[in-house]
Amino acid sequence: MDLIFSNGIGTLRIVLRQEKRDYVLEKVLPEKYRSNAPQSEKNAWDKHSNDVVDVTCLMLATMNSDLQK
């Protein structure tokens, strides 16, 4: 099972790197921005948040059904 998991993570990292979303696995999503934050900070947070959702869905979709339980 460890080998299957390792191969799956390796494949996932390749796909995420190509999509420029591999940072989601390493970088923690910070707390949501303040209402008076600069627009660039808001945009960066929104992108990171959306990427987290996309990566989570991709991980669940490719996961062995036994592991989803």
Image: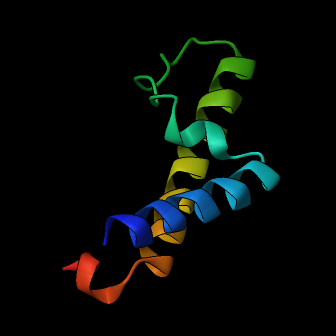
| Residue 14 horizontal/vertical position (percent) | 71, 56
Task: Determine the residue positioned at 48% across, 79% down.
Answer: 61
Residue 54 position by quadrant: bottom right
Task: Determine the residue positioned at 71% across, 61% down.
Answer: 15
Judge by depth and name the residue closer to the eye, 36 or 50. Answer: 50
The C terminus is located in which quarter?
bottom left
Q: Is residue 41 left or right of residue 1?
A: right
Residue farthest to the left, as pictured: 69
The N terminus is located in which quarter?
bottom left
| Residue 27 horizontal/vertical position (percent) | 52, 28
Residue farthest to the right, as pictured: 18
Answer above or below: position of 58 versus 28.
below
Q: Is residue 68 left or right of residue 36?
A: left
Task: Determine the residue positioned at 50% across, 20% down.
Answer: 33
| Residue 41 horizontal/vertical position (percent) | 66, 19
Q: Is residue 19 left or right of residue 42?
A: right
Residue farthest to the bottom, as pictured: 65
User: Tell me, what colour scheme is on the image?
Assistant: rainbow
Judge by depth and name the residue closer to the eye, 27 or 67. Answer: 67
Q: How many marks?
A: 0
Task: Determine the residue positioned at 68% across, 13% down.
Answer: 38
Residue 67 position by quadrant: bottom left
Q: Is residue 42 left or right of residue 30?
A: right
Answer above or below: position of 42 versus 24.
above
